[in-house]
């Protein structure tokens, strides 16, 4: 039998995102109970704390707080005690334990987890650029890319691009399609930006057959046929041979992280040689 809807006031001196996630995860364990979260974020003034605690008393709410300042935590504890309001200090106990364990005092600076700087915006820009320029879209943007990945279908171009974008690199990827010339812009940019991706025919056959099955397409489609795959790989290799400045990365059996590490290592070596 479900109980009445109860209120939980979540007080944070930052964005409150972490506290909200923790509370919602905990509430999932109470299937027959109903609770409503009210978020109070960036609360750093005593007057605000007093007002919220008074409201909690009136509504018989539980107060859960994540406040990194020792003084503010003590104030909230005292206010809740004075008003006889149930309260949970979500981060204080953890920080006290960590302080003893690490032999260090916490900074007590609100919002460190969500501090936004130049690096954050650089990664956001890189991800947006990479999504817009996936799979050969917008070849006119190739000069703006930090890296360009080239390969036939299912050689991990998109997941690899996304992974590298998370590190702040603007990545374009260009598919090599049998019988279709790559965009002319590809050959007009700095060729040291470009990396070829290749894969063994047997591995690609398995990947494409699984893809066709997932899409509900017939397995005898040329996309998933051994002869056609061999022709595509041979075509890609011929393109790579014509452009010896492109490092060619073998991705068979590799995780995206491993391939990305190979690319970043080559990129770093080239930059150091230039310096």
Image: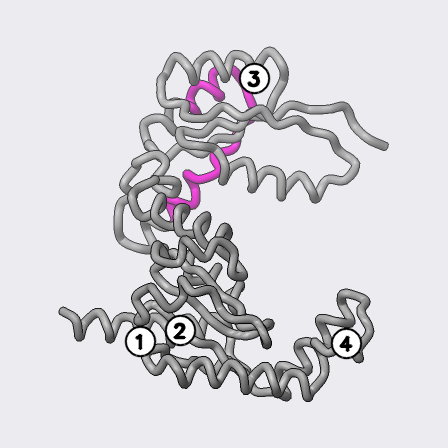
What element does badge 2 sit on?
strand
Q: In the rendered structure, are the residues bearing label 1 and label 2 in contact, judged by CB atoms less than 8 Å apart?
A: yes
Residue 248 quadrant = bottom left
Q: Which residue is mark 4?
A: 221
Residue 56, numbered label: 3
Quick one: quadrant of the N terminus?
top right
Q: Is residue 96 magenta?
A: yes
Spatial separation of the CA atoms under disc 4 and disc 2: 29 Å
Spatial separation of the CA atoms under disc 3 and disc 4: 65 Å
Q: Which residue is mark 2?
A: 195
- Compare marks 1 and 2 and give the one earlier in the sequence: 2
From the viewer's perspective, is 32 left or right of 142?
Answer: right
Percent x, y for residue 157?
51, 68
Spatial separation of the CA atoms under disc 1 and disc 2: 10 Å
Pointer 1 local density, CA inside 10 Å: few below 14, some 14–19, many at least 20: some
Spatial separation of the CA atoms under disc 3 and disc 2: 59 Å
């Amino acid at each position: 039998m479900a109980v009445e809807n109860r209120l939980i006031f979540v007080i944070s001196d930052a964005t409150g995102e972490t506290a909200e996630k923790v509370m919602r995860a905990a509430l999932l364990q109470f299937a027959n109970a109903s609770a409503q979260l009210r978020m109070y974020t960036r609360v750093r003034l005593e007057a605000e704390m007093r007002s919220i605690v008074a409201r909690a008393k009136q509504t018989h709410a539980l107060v859960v707080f994540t406040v990194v300042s020792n003084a503010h935590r003590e104030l909230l504890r005292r206010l809740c005690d004075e008003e006889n309001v149930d309260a949970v200090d979500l981060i204080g106990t953890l920080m006290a334990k960590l302080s003893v364990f690490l032999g260090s005092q916490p900074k007590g600076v609100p919002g460190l987890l969500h501090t936004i700087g130049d690096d954050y915006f650089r990664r956001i820009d890189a991800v947006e650029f990479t999504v817009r320029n996936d799979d050969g879209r917008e070849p006119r943007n190739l000069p703006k890319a930090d890296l360009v990945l080239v390969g036939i279908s299912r050689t991990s171009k998109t997941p690899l691009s996304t992974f590298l974008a998370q590190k702040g690199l603007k990545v374009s990827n260009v598919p090599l399609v049998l019988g279709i010339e790559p965009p002319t812009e590809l050959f007009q940019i700095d060729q040291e930006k470009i990396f070829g991706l290749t894969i063994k025919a047997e591995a690609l056959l398995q990947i494409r057959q699984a893809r066709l099955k997932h899409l509900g397409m017939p397995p005898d489609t040329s996309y998933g046929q051994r002869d056609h795959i061999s022709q595509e790989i041979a075509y890609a290799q011929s393109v790579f041979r014509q452009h010896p400045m492109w490092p060619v990365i073998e991705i068979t059996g590799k995780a995206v992280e491993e391939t990305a590490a190979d690319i970043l290592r080559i990129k770093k070596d080239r930059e150091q040689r230039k310096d």
